[in-house]
Image (cartoon, helix red, strand yellow):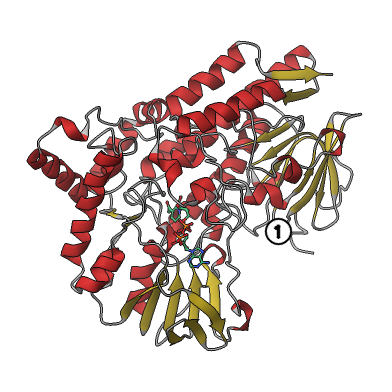
């Protein structure tokens, strides 16, 4: 059995204060807060054989964070922030994985983390107000609280393409990449998917492979990252300003230490507008979306101006006009799908060893033992890469068989789409807390900021229960219904819910189409969470 060195392996009927599922950013943060700050008895279970979550699994070539390193990290410990040295602006996967391992060691978290252990079942007992949690190894523990830290983008989506398993070459999903890497030398590689992952992986695979064929269903807008290494003076400046940087990440709409500019695209002349967009393109990163104009995600006409600006960049960069036009998104607004940022994506299509295949017009018919077949061509491949994304927001939660009060199943309760109160609690599932759950800003803001806010809020709620002698808490149906309605209403003002993306579950056949993340921005969301807590957890009912 894997992980036998872990301490809780033989304690099948252990009584815990909390079980946390997942040892990525969220699980590590929760363990630290609950155990070291609150003094709780906590056990973390993690499927992987290392900590890191997203940054453990996504080790594909080119994997790099799209948020800047110095604020894509924990703020809960000043010394941690001061001692860790980020090497540059956008850290690569190994660097973030190292950081999270450092956090696990620095706070001695590993002694309460059981690796290589998937939680399969969780059942709430109304008689004891406790969760009974079972793992794939047959262990069973009891906990007052069940806290899910399973990630929003962790359930890899391997599309059900005919003949998929008949392929005789190597095939990999980007989120299940082998630890030793993949040698592409002299190989013909096919890559399916042009989301953030495919866009990061394409240039790196192209540089190593004999030939890379990118199978594109939907072209995507991407803006250059402009990655740069930090100079020693950058480090000094960041560390000097850390308290201010972290404060700003908690106050800004997207959890970055920057505030969006309050200026409409229509407030300036076309020349000035182009100059601003050009400046943002040169600067690179997410700022293109919110650093120039405030209406790109609100006004289709404003959005179209930015969209056309990017299309013209593609036409300028990609030498073959037919390929350039294929790479130009024309059916969705910029930002209606999560915008990628890239390093050399479009220029990669100028390489002789790279070709682009439009599978929207001529779909994939099947995967064959020797490659892939579309309606009009056969592609001989040695390696097939699936950069096909995730069953986002709900996939990993629903993989666990969760039974709440009265034996109701989470999968049934969410059959028409997820329903939560603040994205943290679910009516009918007492003492369950979902870190960055659907209905919270989660993926739309800088994740460590979203995670720390949830962990703090959950800890305060548990503290309130301890002080008032309660052993059971759950959202009321009324409060949950109102929140779900609010999330849906707010989403109507944004273009984010209008693309066929994982934001709305459109990437998974048969998944109910619901805008899962809260699009109202961090300040409004935090205000609401604080108001609920300050009113004695209004909208939640307690029992003993
Ligand atoms: O997944 P995606 P991703 N046949 O769902 C295509 C985060 N992230 O892994 O658009 C053919 O965005 C699909 O086509 P279409 C980030 O939040 C962060 O790239 O559905 N194609 C699409 O092109 C991101 O948004 C970072 O038509 C199929 C692609 O696969 C999220 O993760 C880095 C298909 C999937 O794109 C997910 O990104 C990377 C099929 N059957 C990712 N099924 C960093 O910040 C799907 N596709 C580091």
Element type at marker 1? loop
- Does 228 sit left or right of 528 as displayed? left
Disc 1: CA contacts within 10 A as few (<14), some (14-19) or many (>=20): some
In percent of width and height, residue 347 lies at: 24, 68
Instruction: Answer whether residue 7 is visible to the viewer in this image.
Output: no
Task: Decide: is 299 above or below 534.
Answer: below
In percent of width and height, residue 212 lies at: 37, 79
* Front residue of 98 and 262: 262
Name which residue lies at 42% across and 86% down: 187
In percent of width and height, residue 9 lies at: 81, 52
Q: Which quadrant would the C terminus be assigned to in this image? A: top right
The residue furthest right is 127
Task: Decide: is 209 above or below 264.
Answer: below
The residue furthest top is 535
Q: Which residue is mark 1?
A: 116
In percent of width and height, residue 61 lies at: 43, 67
- Does 263 sit left or right of 111 as displayed? left
Task: Decide: is 475 above or below 441.
Answer: above
* Front residue of 441 and 19: 441
Instruction: Answer whether residue 527 is visible to the viewer in this image.
Output: yes
Name which residue lies at 37% across and 35% down: 256
- Does 437 sit left or right of 12 as displayed? left
Task: Decide: is 375 above or below 344.
Answer: below
- Does 390 sit left or right of 376 as displayed? right
Q: Which quadrant would the N terminus be assigned to in this image? A: bottom right
Name which residue lies at 31% across and 55% down: 222
* Front residue of 387 and 200: 387
Name which residue lies at 29% across and 53% down: 225
Some atom of ligand 1 lies within 8 Å of the CB belonging to the residue at label 1: no
Q: Quadrant of residue 329?
A: bottom left
The mark total stands at 1
């Amino acid at each position: 059995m894997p992980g036998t060195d872990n301490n809780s392996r033989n304690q099948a009927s252990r009584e815990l204060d909390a079980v946390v599922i997942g040892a990525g950013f969220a699980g590590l943060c929760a363990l630290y807060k609950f155990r070291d700050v609150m003094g709780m008895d906590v056990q973390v279970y993690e499927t992987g054989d290392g900590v890191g979550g997203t940054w453990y699994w996504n080790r594909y070539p080119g994997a790099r964070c799209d948020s800047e390193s110095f604020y894509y990290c924990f703020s809960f410990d000043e010394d941690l922030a001061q001692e860790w040295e980020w090497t540059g602006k956008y850290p690569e996967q190994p660097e973030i994985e190292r950081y999270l391992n450092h956090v696990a060691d620095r706070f001695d978290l590993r002694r309460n983390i059981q690796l290589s252990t998937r939680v399969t079942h969780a059942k709430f007992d109304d008689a004891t107000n406790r969760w009974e949690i079972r793992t794939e190894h047959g262990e069973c523990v009891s906990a007052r609280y069940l806290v899910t830290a399973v990630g929003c983008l962790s359930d890899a989506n391997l599309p059900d393409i005919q003949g998929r398993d008949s392929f005789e070459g190597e095939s990999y999903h980007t989120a299940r990449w082998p630890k030793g890497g993949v040698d592409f030398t002299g190989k013909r590689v096919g890559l399916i998917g042009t989301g953030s992952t495919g866009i990061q992986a394409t240039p790196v695979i192209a540089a190593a492979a004999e030939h890379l064929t990118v199978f594109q269903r939907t072209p995507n807008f991407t803006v250059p990252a402009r990655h740069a290494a930090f100079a020693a003076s950058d480090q000094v400046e960041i560390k000097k300003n850390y308290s201010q940087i972290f404060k700003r990440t908690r106050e800004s709409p997207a959890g970055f230490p920057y505030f969006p500019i309050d200026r409409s695209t229509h407030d300036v002349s076309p020349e000035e507008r182009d100059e601003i967009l050009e400046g943002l393109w040169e600067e690179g990163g997410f700022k293109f979306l919110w650093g120039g104009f405030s209406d790109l995600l609100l006004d289709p006409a404003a959005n179209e101006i930015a969209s056309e600006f990017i299309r013209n960049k593609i036409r300028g960069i990609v030498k073959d006009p037919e390929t350039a036009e294929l790479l130009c998104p024309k059916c969705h607004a910029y930002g209606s799908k999560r915008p990628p940022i890239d390093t050399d994506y479009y220029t990669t299509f100028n390489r002789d060893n790279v070709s682009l295949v439009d599978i929207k017009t001529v779909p994939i018919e099947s995967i064959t033992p020797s490659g892939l077949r579309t309606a009009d061509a056969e592609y001989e491949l040695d390696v097939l890469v699936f950069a096909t994304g995730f069953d986002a927001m709900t996939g990993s939660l629903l993989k666990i068989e969760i039974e709440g009060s009265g034996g109701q199943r989470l999968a049934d309760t969410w059959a028409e789409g997820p329903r939560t109160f603040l994205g943290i609690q679910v009516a009918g599932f007492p003492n369950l807390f979902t870190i960055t759950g659907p209905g919270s800003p989660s993926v739309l803001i800088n994740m460590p900021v979203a995670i720390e806010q949830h962990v703090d809020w959950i800890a305060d709620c548990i503290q309130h229960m301890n002080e008032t002698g309660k052993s059971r808490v759950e959202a009321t149906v009324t409060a949950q219904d109102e929140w779900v309605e609010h999330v849906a209403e707010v989403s109507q003002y944004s273009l984010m819910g209008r693309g066929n993306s994982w934001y709305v579950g459109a990437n998974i056949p048969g998944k109910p189409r619901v805008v899962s993340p809260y699009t109202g921005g961090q300040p409004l969301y935090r205000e609401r969470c604080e108001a609920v807590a300050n009113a004695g957890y209004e909208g939640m009912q307690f029992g003993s």
